[in-house]
Amino acid sequence: MADNSTACAKGRLEGAAQDRCDAACVYLGRQPIVGGNGALKAYELLFRSSGHNQALVTDDAQATAHVVAHTIGSVGVAAALGVHQGYVNVGATLLFDDALLLLPPERFVLEVLETVTIDDALLARVDALRRAGFRIALDDIGDVSEPFCAALPHIDIVKVDFVQARRASLGALAELVRARGKTLVAEKIETREDFALARELGFELFQGYFFARPQVLSARRAEPSRQSLLRVLALIAADAALVELESELKRNPEVVVQLLRLVNSSAYGLGRRIASVREAIIATGTRQVARWVQLLLYASDSGLPWQSDPLVQLAGTRSRFMELAASHVRPRDERFVDTAFMTGIFSLVPALLGDAASADVLMRLGLVAEIADAITHGAGPLGALLAVAKAAECGSAEAAVRTAAAVHGELAVLEPALLAELNLSAATWFSARAVS
């Protein structure tokens, strides 16, 4: 009896620990797609709501939004896919939403789910997505049907479900697809015999438990509130001035971090390092910012304000403090003020994203070297200003200013009375959004 009680208690503790982890993390499944020789060719990216390797999909649109948002904004395209392509399941709702255009088309294949009705509107949309550069796959095909034949000229890839397909019709199905020049993928391959049959029938790519079960990737959860996302959308819809959009985004540190990941995951960046929120907006374009925000709204599954996260609060107040301090140190240097704000936000990137503190992480985000060096090595006036900001959080900013001013004399302007004022102003500025 005692042994059973101990085992039960241990199980409860482990379950509680997993629940805490699930609440703090986002998850993404990926399953290899291989060639005939077993070499990795692509990954299918899969919805996972927890560390348990199960899909548990209740809403196709939300599931796809989670996959896309977590791939771009949390895990990162490079970490999720490496140099390979990613297959993403898409239902009817998101198929017609331009949020899909956030995905770099050269990196992603859109899998049209078997639940989607194939009609003229769908085929027109698929044609438009192909013109945008995407390759389109039909998922879970089991036999030759009239809707399938209608769709075949409009798609690139056919994924045949080897569990559901009738074996007697596999040959005719494979022959039809190959005659149209489409790529054949055999999915749910679970035995060596299925693999041998698929190869014999001319399938080019293969996926299933015979090769590998899905792997679960995780990253720290970064979920902005729906209210803040709606404010950003409202500004874009009203064609607000860039300065207004920039001001709103500055109040959303985690959205800014994800925006940098978006810039670096796509083919439409500036081709140079990012030094300010404004440059990130320009690099992405307001239309893409709107699509990203729409995607985050799809993916949101709770109304909890991200302002309740102490790390986010710290990032917001620190970045504002540094922005205000920089404007006193160099009142006519707008770029220095902007880079000070960005340094404040990204000084907490390792904690916000769960990454190890390293120059590599910051450089992958596309920041200018002076920001990365300030955070990693405390270098330059931005590094000195960051040291002052950190000291201000502990109530010892005056000593930090004296130390910094010995090397960077311009920081001597930050006198004790001014530091107290900046601290209060930064805290007030950020917390104002928590009650709006």
Image (cartoon, rainbow, N blue to C red):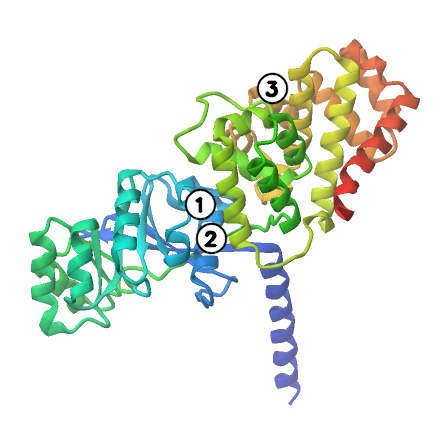
Question: Against 427, is 410 above or below?
Answer: above
Quadrant position of residue 362? top right
The reply to whether callout 1 and callout 3 are in contact (CB within 8 Å) is no
Q: Is residue 422 left or right of residue 69?
A: right
- What residue does disc 1 label? 99
The Cα–Cα distance between marks 2 and 1, rounded to whole angstroms, is 9 Å
> Tag 3, which secondary structure?
helix
For the point 29% across and 43% down, the residue is: 128
Question: Can you give x and y, in whole percent of width and height, for residue 230 in the image?
Answer: 61, 46
Type of the residue with mark 2: Ala
Mark 2 against mark 3, which lies toward the viewer? 2
Q: Residues within 10 Å of mark 2 (few under 14, many from 20)?
A: many
Towards the viewer: 334 or 167: 334
Mark 2 against mark 1, which lies toward the viewer? 1
Question: Can you give x and y, in whole percent of width and height, for residue 371 in the image?
Answer: 61, 23
Q: Residues within 10 Å of mark 3 (few under 14, many from 20)?
A: some
The reply to whether callout 2 and callout 1 are in contact (CB within 8 Å) is yes
- What residue does disc 2 label? 65
Type of the residue with mark 1: Ala
Question: Can you give x and y, in whole percent of width and height, for residue 135 in the image?
Answer: 26, 45
The Cα–Cα distance between marks 1 and 3, rounded to whole angstroms, is 33 Å
Question: Against 345, is 302 above or below?
Answer: below
- What residue does disc 3 label? 370
